[in-house]
Image (spheres, grey):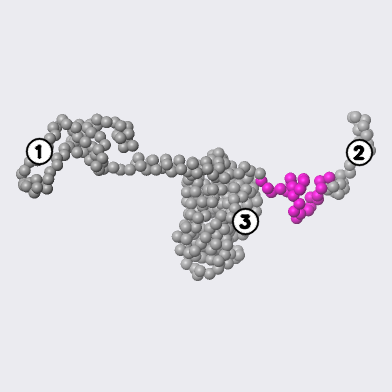
Amino acid sequence: MTVDPLTGEMVEEIEWGDNDTVDGMLGFRFDEHETQDRSGLRGLINSSMISHPAAPALELVFDRVPPRFTKCLRHLANDALDVSLETVATVRFSEFLGERTEGSVLGLFQSDSLDNYSLLCADPVFVYSLVDILMGGARVQAAGDVARSYTSIEIALISRIFEALCTELTRAFDTIVEAPFTLAAVETNPRFAAITRENAVCALAKCRVDVLGVRGQLHILMPYANLEPVRDRLHKDRLTHAVHGQRHWKDILNERVRDTKLELSCVLAERVLTLRDIEKLSVGDVLSFDQALHDSVSLSVGRHQLASGQIGRAGERFAVRLDQSGAQIREKLS
């Protein structure tokens, strides 16, 4: 016990030199790195769990990628490959890079509609097996645990696969935002794939690839900061997401219909003839019509009359001055 010189009160001193005293206050020892205890203060310090609002639409997008990418791989490799989505998780960027095995290939891709870069990651099992197929190797189980550097041809082949995956991601994101993804670079060293801060929160889609009797891993990592421009759409539920998709395709169909080309016919006059009248026709005969030069002519598409007008001349060409506006013609079509 000592006396505080300012207040004059008795103060109990605590000896901090003893580590047991500090450990007793905290409830654990700092040198216990291997413990799995996540309670109390230890849970706050060592917690790797991340609290982030759910993004149902993003999970729907990731769920659409594997079936389409499976068809793409089967077309490229001409073999029975299968891609399936295992889970969609939320991780920190440093944790994702720390779990990469030696020999993993990382692809950096981006979109002008979204911020910054995202990552694609293929583990060695998937890379070695797929390269063996594309290079015409025997259809046997590939060894994915052989650590070696990749050749330029192998990097070019995996780049082609990543580009195909970017195409499928673009189609999957089409109902959320028009975001054409393009592959920017392919890296084999995780240090050169630091696209964001180490503590940045990211969405991670883990896919399993069954090829040549082994199971490889294919990951898609997108920092949530990149998805801020479409944050509101990603947090919508399934029903709203479906309605948005229907409206999106309705707009596309409307644009395609407006761009459809039609063959427009100008009918100057018409006359009905019997087959007997046609048989009697000879060279030099003149057919007369009950139509004056100043009478209106009709404009038709197939058998449907769209408008009428007065025939005239514009420069060296014949012309028709319409009696109806485009809005009136469109109303007639509808």
Residue 100, disc: 3
Pick whichever of labels 2 and 1 is earlier in the sequence. Answer: 2
Please report the residue visible at 63 percent of the width from the left and 43 percent of the height from the top. 52
Q: Which mark is residue 12?
A: 2
> Which region is colored magenta?
25-50
**Can residue 116 be seen here?**
no
**How many C-alpha atoms fall within 10 Å of the one at disc 1: few (<14), some, or many (≥20)?**
few
**Magenta stretch encompasses residue 42:** yes
Whether the magenta-drawn stretch holds residue 48 is answered as yes
Q: CA distance from mark 1 to mark 3?
A: 87 Å
Return the mark for residue 288.
Answer: 1
**Could you tell me which residue is drawn at 61 percent across and 50 percent down?**
89
Q: Nearer the viewer, residue 201 or 251?
A: 251
Q: How would you classify the magenta stretch by its main secondary structure?
A: loop
- Dot 2: element: loop
Asked if residue 261 lies left or right of residue 309, the reply is: right
